[in-house]
Image (cartoon, grey):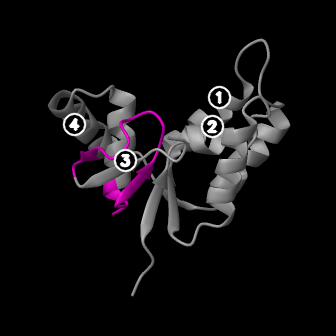
Amino acid sequence: MSAERVFVDTNVLAYLFDDSEPKKQAKARKLLEGETREIFVSTQVLQELYVSLTKGRDPITTPEVAEEAVRAAAGYSVVQIDVALVIAAIEASRKHRLSFWDALIVRAASHGDCGTLLSEDLNDGQVIDGVTVENPFA
């Protein structure tokens, strides 16, 4: 029997480095370090992770640490964003009234055959195209 697959959104990974959110940071660490399910991310998540960790006047961390974070996250199973997924996300965005970026995350999770999407950006318990959203910080 294969391990359950779970897709991890950018915000969960970013909290690993966010000292301004100690409770969420601890929860993200516990969740990912103790995870027994197969973890998936997408190339979109890798890009967003670097940007979210380095953006603004008071970034969460340095570009060097952010690069290491991306390299570490790339060690999970990675769903490549391609033209077909972009088109599918456009359709999902219209169908489910989601932002394009959220729809792309959902479609990547579905493409990776993940039953669960860990994210705080969507409604906890919401099921979209067979993927159940779980907000680990709720």
* Residue for point 41% across, 51% down: 117
Res. 52 mark: 1
Percent position of residue 54, x then y: 74, 26
Amino acid carrying label 1: it is Ser
Single out the residue that lies furthest toward the bottom. 1
Residues under labels 4 and 3: Cα distance? 15 Å
Q: Which residue is mark 3?
A: 133
**Could you tell me the amino acid type at mark 4?**
Ala
Q: Amino acid at mark 3?
A: Val
48 displayed left or right of 124: right
* Rendered location of residue 86, percent (x, y): 31, 37
At mark 3, the secondary structure is strand
Which comes before the other along the chain, label 2 or label 3? Answer: 2
Disc 2 and disc 4: Cα gap in Å?
Answer: 23 Å
Pick the residue in front: 84 or 63. Answer: 63
Pointer 2 residue: 49
> Spatial distance from mark 2 to mark 3, Cα to Cα?
19 Å
- Crowding around mark 2 (Cα neighbors within 10 Å: few <14, some 14 to 19, many 20+) is many
Q: In the rendering, which numbered label is found on residue 92? A: 4
Which stretch appears magenta?
110-129
Which residue does the image show at 22% across and 26% down from the upper left?
97
Graded by Cα atoms within 10 Å as few (under 14), some (14 to 19) or many (20 or more), the crowding at tag 1 reads some
Q: Give the label, 2 or 3, closer to the camera.
A: 3
Horizontal side, residue 111 vs residue 42: left or right? left
User: Which image quadrant is residue 137 in?
Assistant: top right
Q: Are marks 2 and 1 in contact (CB under 8 Å)?
A: yes
